[in-house]
Image: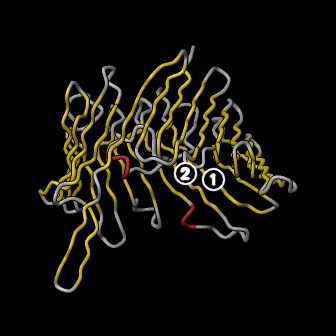
Amino acid sequence: MRKLLLLIYILPTQFFSQESPIEEYLTKVEHLDHKGCVKSIFVEDAKFDKNEEKIDYLSKTYKVIYDNRGRIRKQLIYWKDLQNPFKITTYDTLNRVSKVEINRDDGNGEILIPYFRDDLKDPDSIKTFSLEMKERRKYINYFKNGLVIRRDLFENDTLRYYTLFEYDSNNHLSKELNINTKDGFGVINKLGNSTTKYLNKNDSTLYNYREVGDTIIIDRERHKGLVVTEKSYENDDVIINIEKQTSTARGFTFQTRTNFKWKDSTKIEYKYYKDKDDLKSYTNTYIYEDKIISEWMNYIGQPEQQDVTDIKTTFDNKGNWISKTFIRNNVVVEEIRRTIDYCEKLH
């Protein structure tokens, strides 16, 4: 029987915020589903306004390179110049980031390199450099029984802040404490010839795990006032994710989001409340292979509105899609094109 995961935490931050600083340097890529053995997939995802003019800041262009075992080895992110990637992310054979190189127009690029020991998921240290390989900052992890118990951030050989991690008897994260040093981050005020620095407050996150029947409950508390409850359920037919945001001061749930994922379709449901069980508005989105249907009501009692986006898909002779065009009200709003380089057949 599959577990039902119930996550309750204070403040809408990410589940398990003990994420590596590497995550801040990564770019999310999509549309990589494919059949067979491929060497690379080049994706151009263009968004358009109502006049079918391309919206540059919403559009993405990237290339993903695979090894002969289907593992991602390199990810190239492009901005203006398709000959020179804006960002290059390299992965090792354990699917860990081994290098991130960022090239900016102003020449102020950056290189991030994690240093791993053995097959540990977390690196011993993470360093960032200028493009000339001059060190800018570094994170150092300290381990106990394979778990990170402390992480330091140094800039110019000065300790700026550190984070302590505590775990329960089942190796679940139970406490995360961020501590500023005297050289830590804060607000600097200048008045005349005097300069005053106010350090950011140290903050902590507490976790509590308990299991009730088939439900795992995780409480996460950082600040009071907002409780976010997440539930996830999965079986062979559907994956369901539910998120509820509740105001402790007002004493009711004011927003819910439910995501249903089947093999061939998806439903995303948002509900907004003005009081306990008093629905104010809603949005339902149904995603199919050939269309997207959106239904919404801005205020309950008004007429429901609907939009339909048709999806036209083209496939190559390998059965992989190479283009998708999204059309709403006879206007192209998005176009995704893929160039797939396949593995050579062995003779």
The location of residue 268, given as percent across then percent down, is 68, 42
The location of residue 302, given as percent across then percent down, is 86, 56
Question: In terms of sequence position, does the residue under pointer 1 or pointer 2 come before the other?
Answer: 2
Q: Which residue is mark 1?
A: 336
Outermost residue to the left: 157
Compare residues 247 and 63 and report the one nearer the observer: 247
Q: Which residue is mark 2?
A: 43
Please give the name of the residue rendered at 30% of the width and 64% of the height, measured from the top-left corner.
109
Q: Is residue 319 left or right of residue 221?
A: right
Q: Is residue 185 visible?
A: yes
Say what amino acid the circle numbered 1 marks: Ile
Q: Do residues under tags 1 and 2 come within 8 Å of each other at their CB atoms?
A: yes
Outermost residue to the bottom: 192
Q: Secondary structure at mark 2?
A: strand
Compare residues 308 and 170 and report the one nearer the observer: 170
Q: Is residue 213 left or right of residue 255?
A: left
Determine the image quadrant of residue 197: bottom left
